[in-house]
Amino acid sequence: MSVEYKDYYKLLGVSKTAGQEEISKAFKKLARKHHPDLNPNDPEAEKKFKEFNEAYEVLKDPEKRKLYDSLGPNWQHGQNFQRPSGFEGGGYSFNGQQFDAGAFSDFFETIFGGAGGGRTRYERGGNFSDLGGGFGGFGGFGGGGGYAPGPTRGSDANATLELTLEEAYKGGAKAITLQEQAIGPDGSPRLGTKTLNVNIPAGVREGGKIRLSGQGNPGRAGGKAGDLYLKVKILPHALFKLEEGNVILDLPLAPWEAALGAKVRVPTLDGAVEMHIPAGSSSGRKLRLSGKGLGGQGKRGDQLVRLMVQVPAGVTDAQRELWEQLAAASTDFSPRSF
């Protein structure tokens, strides 16, 4: 039985020597023209779109393209090739040229590699029709002498997990709902939702990743599903700011608290604590509460309390008189050194 060899260059309307930019432009032009959404009344649009996408997936990748070109010197003429009478010697004959079976298998592993870079294993037995049309014009080699796809692990998936600063600090269980593309009863792709319970590590930082095993894209031919990676994004907070693992709090102080010292209740992610403000503290000074930031055990950041001295917007006559007395008595102090 013979099978027709598809000419991917001809499909995209480019020459065999075309560069990557030319191939990319040709594909985008054809994809826009034949996209099924833009041609709802053309039953052939989806088929053409899939063929263009199939061709581009091979020709855009230098390694896949090299292996594709190595199938034979007359591929550009649509030359048929025959299944050899046997597999003795581990070789296959294509258009008069001999190819090592391992190299032939590598070609299909590269072409049909799992989404996300996984490689598909092919075993003897079965035929190419098992591939579900993944390589266009290949039918079956028949007679049990072809290759059948083995189980392939699904690709990993990524999503963003938004957390409040308190959730990131304390950790714990959290239910999240994600959108995913699923196959409907009619075989067409559609958007669905799924809810997952996530165990958030206490102290997880911005950009940290949480791995959910087996929650990624499904595998092929009974292969295991990939993993889902949740990238942490910490939402803005009304009181606190983040500097890597440290939590920053601006603490307003009255002038006399800064000058004379005071005990002030300070909010933290663990609840309010009482902090001693040393006498003579200037605005901008930072005090440290150890271990009140983000990070894992032994690597926790701190909470930095930045003192911000505030003055009254308006004063009474009596207050003004007291300020003037303070100024007159402070002749040995100057806030400026220039």
Image (cartoon, rainbow, N blue to C red):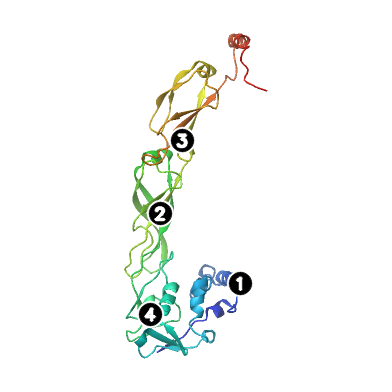
52 vs 187, nearest the viewer: 52
Horizontal and vertical percent for residue 80? 47, 88
Q: Which residue is mark 2?
A: 229
- Tag 4: amino acid: Ser
- Tag 1: amino acid: Glu
Which numbered dot is residue 129? 4
| 2 or 4: tag closer to the N-terminus | 4
Numbered disc 1: secondary structure: helix
Q: CA distance from mark 3 to mark 2?
A: 25 Å
| 1 or 4: tag closer to the N-terminus | 1
Is there a contact, CB below 8 Å, between mark 3 and mark 2?
Answer: no
| 3 or 1: tag closer to the N-terminus | 1
Q: CA distance from mark 4 to mark 3?
A: 59 Å
What is the quadrant of residue 234 in the picture? Answer: top left
Image quarter where the C terminus lies is: top right
Which numbered dot is residue 22? 1
Horizontal and vertical percent for residue 264? 44, 21
Horizontal and vertical percent for residue 175? 35, 47
How crowded is the residue under tag 4: few (<14 C-alpha within 10 Å), some, or many (20+)? Answer: some
Tally the marks: 4
Residue occupying image coordinates x 38% and y 80%: 128
259 vs 2, nearest the viewer: 259
| 4 or 3: tag closer to the N-terminus | 4
